[in-house]
Amino acid sequence: MMATTNIPFAINETEEIVTAGAPAMATNDLHVYYGDNHAIQGVDLEFHENQVTALIGPSGCGKSTYLRALNRMNDEIDGCRMEGEILYNGININRKEVDLYNVRKEIGMVFQKPNPFTKSIFENIAFSLKRHGIKNKAELAERVEKSLRSAALWEEVKDDLGKSALSLSGGQQQRLCIARAIAMQPEVLLLDEPASALDPISTSKIEDLIHELKRKYTIIIVTHNMQQAARVSDHTAFFYLGKVVEVSDTGTLFTKPSNKQTQDYISGNFG
Ligand SMILES: Nc1ncnc2c1ncn2[C@@H]1O[C@H](COP(=O)(O)OP(=O)(O)OP(=O)(O)O)[C@@H](O)[C@H]1O
């Protein structure tokens, strides 16, 4: 169940922890359990503003579980429990009194399979804004246009805003989902294999978009595709069996990994 109390989690007055150069997000000794399955086993990572971090590793090693921990989406899964710190602007948001609505507004998420609402293109974005108290029509229209422009979708849909979002192609739907997340003015975007269900042209559009979006946001992306990690990210973390085996700048991780398991994974000799 969602917490409803309005405990601040990202302000500078009562909890002045934010310092220049500090990570936008980090985890300290993060553990995630599904019942007895210890899926994430003490992960420490830092994510900096305007940087893209890719999470890579073999299937089942905990990448999506870790990503979902960052905006407390794992709270929605029965039997899932998390221990350790999840720091957002220096404040631990892994506390039960934290307002999850605010957490997910500030730390937006886009999933593998595009999941637009069965509403018009316009309403897909306006819906959450209205829920957030924005009722003025001109302001709504402006925020919708701005979000669609930021997601590189405006030119393709500006004459069809009243059409169902489901009439869009898969790639357009995924950009609409990104626009929907952006509309809430988040600081962090979590992308869980955002292009894995898309054709190569749509994939390339999403990758170009990630390059654009990192000017404004901190981006963390799970991907199975190592070429994609190499193309879009500044840092890469290699996960294996619920732990981070190695994390470094992407160039180094793919050319001079310091760990043998990383080397085996990136060269395809794994398992
Ligand atoms: N909703 C869930 N309920 C129970 N166990 C889960 C759930 N999601 C993941 N797990 C378990 O947690 C572990 C990590 O899975 P996770 O999906 O995070 O790995 P992954 O690296 O993202 O895998 P993939 O690349 O295949 O998506 C696995 O043992 C998996 O079975």
Image (spheres, rainbow, N blue to C red):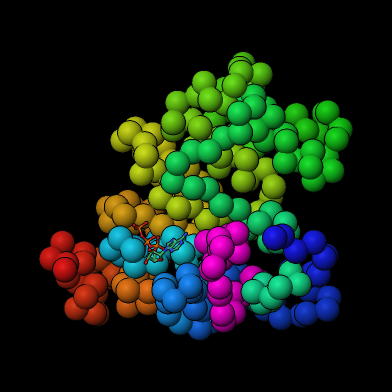
Residue placed at 79% from the left, 38% from the top? 130
In the rendering, at what x and y percent does residue 226 appear?
28, 56
For the point 56% across and 52% down, which residue is it? 109
Q: Quadrant of residue 122?
A: top right
Percent of width and height locating residue 42: 45, 82
| Residue 115 visible in the shown view | yes
Task: Specify the quadrant of the image occupied by residue 243.
Answer: bottom left
Q: Pick the residue in front: 123 or 76.
A: 76
Q: Which residues are magenta?
A: 68-89
Question: On the rendering, which quadrant does ligand 1 occupy?
Answer: bottom left
Furthest-top residue in this view: 159
Task: State which quarter of the image contains the C terminus.
Answer: bottom left
Q: Nearer the viewer, residue 126 or 73?
A: 73
Instruction: Write the residue at 66% across / 56% down.
Output: 104
Relative height, residue 211 to residue 21 (above, below) = above
Please tell me whether residue 79 is drawn above or below residue 203 in the rendered image.
Answer: below
| Residue 175 in view (yes/no) | no
| Magenta region includes residue 81 | yes
In the image, is residue 258 above or below residue 145?
Answer: below
Instruction: Tell me how many marks there are.
Output: 0
Q: Who's the residue at 52% across and 56% down the image?
A: 190
Magenta highlight on residue 161: no
- x then y, percent, for residue 57: 31, 65
- Residue 36 appears left or right of 120: left
Q: Is residue 60 left or right of residue 143?
A: left
Quarter of the image for residue 1 reads: bottom right
Q: Position of residue 148 (x, y in %)?
A: 61, 33
